[in-house]
Amino acid sequence: MNIASPSSRVELAGFSRSLAGQDTAALSVSPLELGETATGETSSRVKLGMDTKTCTKCKRTLPTVEFARDASKRCGFKSICKGCDRAKAGAYYRANRDRRRAYWQAKRDEMSAAYFVLRAVRIYGGQCIECGSVEDLEFDHVDNNGAAHREVETLQAVLRRIVRTGQPITDYRLQLLCKRHHLAKTLATRGQAA
C-alpha cells in the first residue's frame, strides 16, 4: 500500500487520520507490516507503530490505547474496550443504584457513630475513672438518672452535643467507666452484690 497524495485519508479500524502536510513516504507499508504473515494469514497485531486488539464484546479491532491496562492479562490489557467497559459499568450502576446508596448510607452512619463515640470518650478523659483502663469504656450517669435522660435524648444526640461543644455536658453528669466497673456500680445501686 503506497500513499501517493498528501491530501488522502487513511482508514484504520474505524479511525481516520488526515495526512495533509505530513511526510507520506514514511507511511508506505508492506502487506507483512499490515499483519499478514508469510503464509498469507492475518496476524492479530498490526505493525503500524501502534498495536491493535479486538474487543470481545463489540468485536471491533481498536488500538490498544482504547483498552484499559490489566496486569493480570498476558497482553497487559482488558479484553473489552474502554467504551464497552464504560457501558458495562454504567449499566451495573443503574441496576444497583438503590442497593449501593443504602450500603454507603449505612457505612456513613456507622463511621459517623464511631467518630462521635471516639471524640466524646476523648473529651471525657479517655479512661475509666476507677481503674484507668482504656478498654470497653461506657458512659455512666453519676446520679443514676440514665433512664430519665434516655427518654429525653438518644445516645447519638448526647454524643453529638458533647463533640459539638467540646466539653462535658452540664445538665446530666456523666463519667467514663470500664464495663466491669459500670456493671459493679449498677448492681450496687440496685442492692445486689457484685
Image: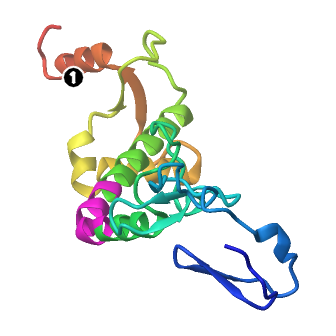
- The residue labelled by disc 1 is 186
Q: Is 86 in front, or is 185?
A: 86
- In the rendering, at what x and y percent does residue 65 appear? 60, 60
- Image point 11% across, 13% down: which residue? 192
The mark tally for this picture is 1
Measured from the top left, where is residue 64 in percent x and y? 57, 57
Residue 110 left/right relative to 42: left
Kindly identify the amino acid type of the residue bearing the numbered disc 1: Thr
Question: What residue sits 41% from the left and 38% below the top?
Answer: 173
Residue 97 is inside the magenta segment: yes
Quadrant in which the C terminus appears: top left
Q: Residue at x 35, y 53 (%)?
A: 109
Figure quadrant of the N terminus: bottom right
Magenta segment boundaries in residue numbering: 92-104
- Quick one: label 1, few (<14), some, or many (20+) residues within 10 Å? some
x and y percent of residue 67 in the render?
52, 58
